[in-house]
Amino acid sequence: MSKIIPIGPYHPLQEEPELFKLYCDGEIVKDIKWETGYNHRGIERLSESKTFDQAFFLVERICGICSTSHPFAFANCMDEIAGVEIPDRAKYIRSIIGELERIHSHLLWVGLAGHFLGYNTVFMWAWKYREPILDLFEIITGNRNSYAMFKIGGVRRDIEEHKIPGIQKVLDSFKKKNDLLTGAVMDDPVIHARTKGVGILTKEDIINYAAVGPTARASDVAIDVRKDDPYAAYPLVNWKVITAKGCDVFAKAEVRLLEMYESISIIEQCLDGLKKTKEGDIEVEVREVPAGYGTGHAEAPRGEVFHFVVTNGSNYPVRHKVRAPSYVNIATFKKSCVGQTITDATISLAAVDPCYCCTERMAYAYDYNTRDKILNGEDILKLSHKKTEEIRKKL
Amino acid sequence: MVSIKDIDNIKNYLKGDIIETEIKSATRATVTIKKDALIRAADYLFNKLKLRFIIASALDSKKGFEIYYHFSNDFSGLVANLHVILPKEKPEVESLTGLFEAANWIEREMHEILGINFLGHPNLEKLISEGNWAKGVYPYRN
């Protein structure tokens, strides 16, 4: 008997309210359909009524987790339209903020992925280790989230010399913790059994759906805007793009865990860079934004964020188009979930790392004909936990 | 690696269908084409030059409804925009869903916010304002 299992509209798997309907035959997912638009905020239209300076605060609120990725892309876009080259110190600061954010966002994903698999030790560790990173943000910017650091032509606040040893100390202690966490995930046979060969996305799927970020890099598609179209301090420091060949959920975890090491290395080199530049030299003055248009992209933790702005010489954008990475990554569910069991659906959906802003849960399974509820959101999670337990006992 | 020269060479391929080519910098170019040549131009960028489709942006301006299709090369950092202008009285253009799946959602979105009709799209249903939004009212029209 064919059943529909809805996940959403409010469910911790998703970055915003969305409804996924899994069409199941027995335990196997046969098709997936989705409905969006539950929380459309009209930010692109709103931005047209904001000055360029105000728009930075608006785009910062598009995503609740990676709140600097949209200002980053918007700043790149506006710098291009205004035709300015920002000072090196501002470039280093922008990259430091971007990379710290990548670390805390990846930690959040690793923790939640562990939780969905019934591996709550990973969940506790990852979220515990995330706290000092958020505290660092408070020291540098004044906020644990929504940092308000970016502006056209530079950044709003400097990272003073006396703060650098403290930042370095936190990074040093985080390195050891990250070794522990990476070992716990990469060497665990149960996690291997639950994530290897699950949620496969081939190279062709990635190109066809234009997927980006760790989702693409886990399928051996080496795209990373930081390397491909260098911006901020990324061309000034040494680092490499992490890819994996597995194409499955495990490969996505591998990419994210190893990327955190690269992020630490980038931050350390940027901190050295700060020492070589003059304190206070963090912006160039931009008096006017000329008429024209510009494109700006930045590599957010989840992939490429793209902004396109059309200007007419006034202080307001005529059109401001925003594309978040999840917009293209979510569409890959059609490939990654179909043919899998329901127990693997949760981790396959979570593998592209849709943000977790919404904490309301409303997922349940009901009979297609009688519409009687069979499973609720917790039951689906329990199914996933049960499978992990069974694998653990067998090993 | 695809460079700005390859984008400029699109002239030889499309010949009379190009209205204007604007090279803004070493990694940014915009090619304005006649709307009937869109499929050929997008096919050239996606299948021949192997560019990645980023997204499309549509806007309502004095010229009509403009659509910018953004493509990127992930080795040279090139961003190439295909630009078409549709008349306001009949905003219609061929759908790119036949070339790549990534055009599916954004064409639905542009149909919804500006009322542009994408010919050959498999499912032009609403994407972002599901349900009770009034018919024939397009929120991004000026």
Image (cartoon, rainbow, N blue to C red):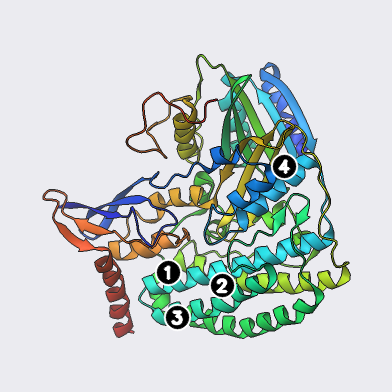
Residues at marks 1 and 4 on the same chain? no
Q: In this view, does A184 lie to the left or right of B133?
A: right
Residue A124 - label: 3
Pinpoint the chain carrying mark 4: B
Q: Name the residue under label 1.
A: A196
Q: What residue type is labelled 2?
A: Leu
Residues at marks 3 and 2 on the same chain? yes
Choose top left, top right, bottom left or bottom right for residue B68. Answer: top right
Q: Mark 2 points at which residue?
A: A257
Q: Which amino acid does label 4 sit on?
A: Val
**Which residue is painted at 83% across and 60% down in the image?**
A88
Sequence-first tag of 3 and 2: 3
The correct choice, above or below, for A370 with respect to A176 in the image is above
Residue A260 - label: none
**Which residue is painted at 39% across and 65% down in the image?**
A347
Choose top left, top right, bottom left or bottom right for residue B134. Answer: top left
Sequence-first tag of 2 and 1: 1
Instruction: Give neighbour class at mark 3: few <14, some 14-19, many 20+ (Cα, 10 Å).
Output: some
Q: In which quarter of the image is the C terminus of chain B?
A: top right
Q: Mark 4 points at which residue?
A: B2
Mark 2 or 1, closer to the camera? 2
